[in-house]
Amino acid sequence: MTGPDSGLSRWEKQTRSSLARTRVFDLDQVRYRHPRRGNERDFIVLQPPDWVNVLALTPEHELVLVRQFRFGIDDFALEIPGGVIETGEDRLVAGARELLEETGYQGSAVQLLGTVIPNPAIQSNRCHIALVTGAVSVGATTWDADEEIEISLCPVDEVLAQARNGRIGHSLVLNALFLFEPWWRKMKGRGV
């Protein structure tokens, strides 16, 4: 439990200085002071933009998946579409845009399933999880210069099984599926 009666102290931000500015994130050094103990310490904070990940559900109850090379793990990863939210862009508009750009799919409706914090120990951003329903292929992809994506469709229950057996290991995709599963179970229960 946190809050005024929990006994935890909120560290006080003192200064912030830039260590690096990159295409993907800014790297800052932030000095904090503990209010009761009085000690000060520098912490490194990544400042990436907010992201949106998209669960795109087709009328046939399949999810649109993407497989692409990921430089951080030096390997391929099975994921859902997603990407950076541009400055001033609405997160649901960004989700629909990323879905169309990466996969050529567009949906009839989009809603927010939830928001997660990718790594609060060192990152400042949020990842928003959008659900696009009625997703159908409407045209060609418009990948970024460094993107090369394999697009596939998979029945929802098979995707959930792949998440449980380790075939899908991307933590933000697992978060999205965790938020989506109750919605999916309720929909299945209605016989839709």
Image: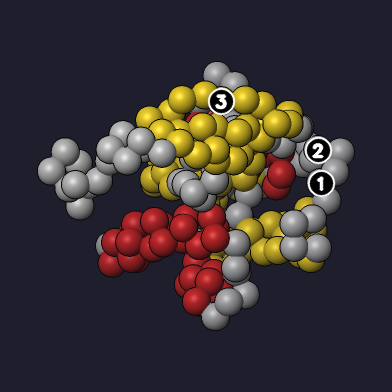
Residue 32 drawn at (x, y percent): 45, 34
Q: Are marks 1 and 2 in contact (CB under 8 Å)?
A: yes
Residue 133 disc label: none
Question: By what rule are the colours in the image chosen?
Answer: secondary structure
Q: Which residue lies furthest to the left in this view?
A: 5
Residue at 33% in and 65% down: 185
- Foreground mark, 2 or 3, reads 3
Which of the two labelled residues, at mark 2 and mark 3, occupies the earlier sequence position?
Answer: 3
SS for callout 1 = loop
Look at mark 2 in the image and give the residue it sits on: 144
Which of the two labelled residues, at mark 1 and mark 3, occupies the earlier sequence position?
Answer: 3
Look at mark 3 in the image and give the residue it sits on: 16
Check disc 1 and give the amino acid type: Glu
Residue at 38% in and 30% down: 12
- Give the distance between the C-alpha atoms of the residues marked 1 and 2, in whole angstroms: 5 Å
Q: In this view, does 135 lie to the left or right of 110?
A: right
Nearer the observer, 71 or 147: 71
Q: Is residue 185 left or right of residue 125?
A: left
